[in-house]
Image: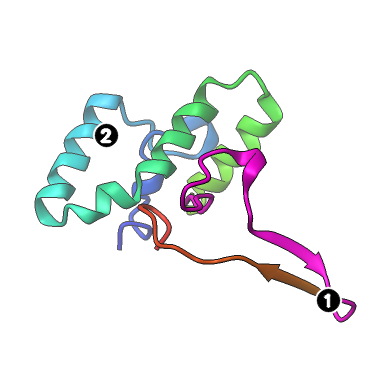
Amino acid sequence: MLKEVGFGALRVPVEFGGLGASLRQTFDLLIALAAADSNLPQALRAHFNLVEDLRLTKDEAAKARWLRAIANGALIGVATTELGVGAVDRYRTAVTSNGAGLQLDGTKYYTTDTL
């Protein structure tokens, strides 16, 4: 239902098709949402973080592409964590070619925002 009402586009500027909410408006809505279900704002944490990064980027092409996608309903999640690794250059999960296609090797662990 949140996706249907454009909740993910709260902070997307109007010129990109978003709702153009202020930070205060967004936080007030997140607090109200948390009162109903505390898991929901937590699950949207990475999404809103990326929206803020996009708002500040100097890469105008990336900004326009992704903010328009978010305004059109895209929700951003994060799924890059491995137990005990803690750095992008040391991931143990790998995609390899096995002759018949691609194979993903690794162990899935639940982490906040990736369910």
Q: Is residue 19 left or right of residue 87?
A: left
Q: Residue at x 40, y 38 (%)?
A: 48
Q: Amino acid at mark 1?
A: Gly
The image's colour scheme reads rainbow
At numbered mark 2, what does the secondary structure look like: helix, strand or loop? helix
Of residues 25 and 44, which is closer to you in this image? Answer: 44
Q: Residue at x 20, y 40 (%)?
A: 29
Residue ID for mark 2: 26
Q: Is residue 87 magenta?
A: yes
Mark number, residue 101: 1
Q: Where is residue 77 shown, x and y percent of the image?
A: 47, 52
User: Magenta part mainly helix, strand or loop?
Assistant: loop
The reply to whether the magenta stretch includes residue 62 is no
Label 2 or label 1, whichever lies nearer to me, is 1
Q: Residue furthest front?
A: 84
* Helix, strand or loop status at disc 1: loop
User: Sequence order check: which comes first, mark 2 or mark 1?
Assistant: 2
Rounded to the nearest angstrom, the CA distance separating label 2 from label 1 is: 44 Å
Residue 19 image-quadrant placement: top left
Report the side of 10 relative to 15 (left or right).
Answer: left
Identify which amino acid the numbered label 2 is placed on. Answer: Thr
Q: Quadrant of the C terminus?
A: bottom left
Residue 114: horizontal and vertical position, in percent?
43, 57
Vertical side of 59 occupied by 43: above or below: below
- Give the quarter of the figure containing the N terminus: bottom left
Q: Is residue 88 above or below residue 112?
A: above
Where's residue 41, x and y in %? 26, 47
Front residue of 100/16: it is: 100
Report the span colored magenta. Answer: 77-101
Give the quadrant of residue 54.
top right
